[in-house]
Amino acid sequence: KNQVEQSPQSLIILEGKNCTLQCNYTVSPFSNLRWYKQDTGRGPVSLTIMTFSENTKSNGRYTATLDADTKQSSLHITASQLSDSASYICVVSSFSGGYNKLIFGAGTRLAVHP
Amino acid sequence: DGGITQSPKYLFRKEGQNVTLSCEQNLNHDAMYWYRQDPGQGLRLIYYSQIVNDFQKGDIAEGYSVSREKKESFPLTVTSAQKNPTAFYLCASSKETMPKNIQYFGAGTRLSVL
């Protein structure tokens, strides 16, 4: 069964600190892995997308890593800001039969406190 | 101002009533999607459309219906057959359904049952 699991479920950090969110997946066939940021009551916004051959990708203070051998990914947030408070969703893409299916994790809810 | 517009932002459904959620995009995307988001769960695909006048069932299509008469519009009807409709509904679009294409999301509609 295709699954994407994220940890921790929620996280509280102080402004200015770094944090790392984890994503483990069992998806086949694998096409790519994406991280989305979702503010409360809003739609998700894409942060990064990585294919099988990419180990790391950055978007400002966000750095995603991918280990395709162990089927793990992480999202590292550097020097957190209050505006980073959101849910972060790991999404794995599986392309089959002419259609690109996305399997969503349940997300990690991050709260950044002053 | 390009993007995906969902309306209404909040919607209430009475017992036995059908309700329709609107989704409009001006990104000239061919593919459009409807997802349901419940607390503590990943997004689940309801329906998707790769081209005008064609759409396919997703993982949880029962109790829902869609139409795709125009490229820009992909309305979702929640029918009385959907016994647990309370959720956050997200519409998305992408250029195509190929693996490299990013899905862009609307701001969502929160549906509640009276």
Image (spheres, grey):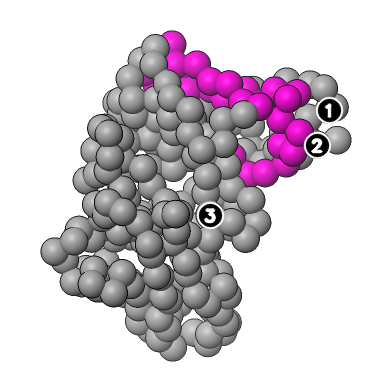
For the residue marked with disc 2, what is the amino acid?
Val
Upstream in sequence: badge 3 or badge 1: 1
Q: Residue farthest to the left? A: A53
Residue A69 in the image, given as x and y percentages of width and height: 23, 72
Could you say whether the residue bearing mark 3 is in a helix, strand or loop?
loop
Determine which of the numbered discs, if any, sits on residue B109 in the image.
none
A56 or A110: nearer the eye?
A56
**How far apart, in angstroms, are the residues tagged by discs 3 and 1?**
26 Å
Q: Residues within 10 Å of mark 3 (few under 14, many from 20)?
A: many
Locate residue A43, reporting x and y percent. 50, 48
Can residue B88 be found in the magenta stretch?
yes
Q: Is A22 in front, or is A42?
A: A22
The C terminus of chain A appears in which quarter of the rendering? bottom right
Report the residue at 13% width, 64% height from top. A53
Residue B14, label in figure? 1
Which residues lie in the magenta part?
A: B63-91
C-beta proximity under 8 Å, tags 1 and 2: yes
Mark sitting on residue B42: 3
The stretch drawn in magenta includes residue B58: no
Q: CA distance from mark 1 to mark 2?
A: 6 Å
Q: Residue furthest front?
A: A1
Chain identity of mark 3:
B
Q: Residue at x 35, y 57 (%)?
A: A27
Confirm whether residue B82 shows in the render. Answer: yes
Would you name the residue on which mark 2 appears? B113
Question: What amino acid does circle 1 point to?
Answer: Lys
Real-space Cα distance between discs 2 and 3?
21 Å
Chain where mark 1 sits: B
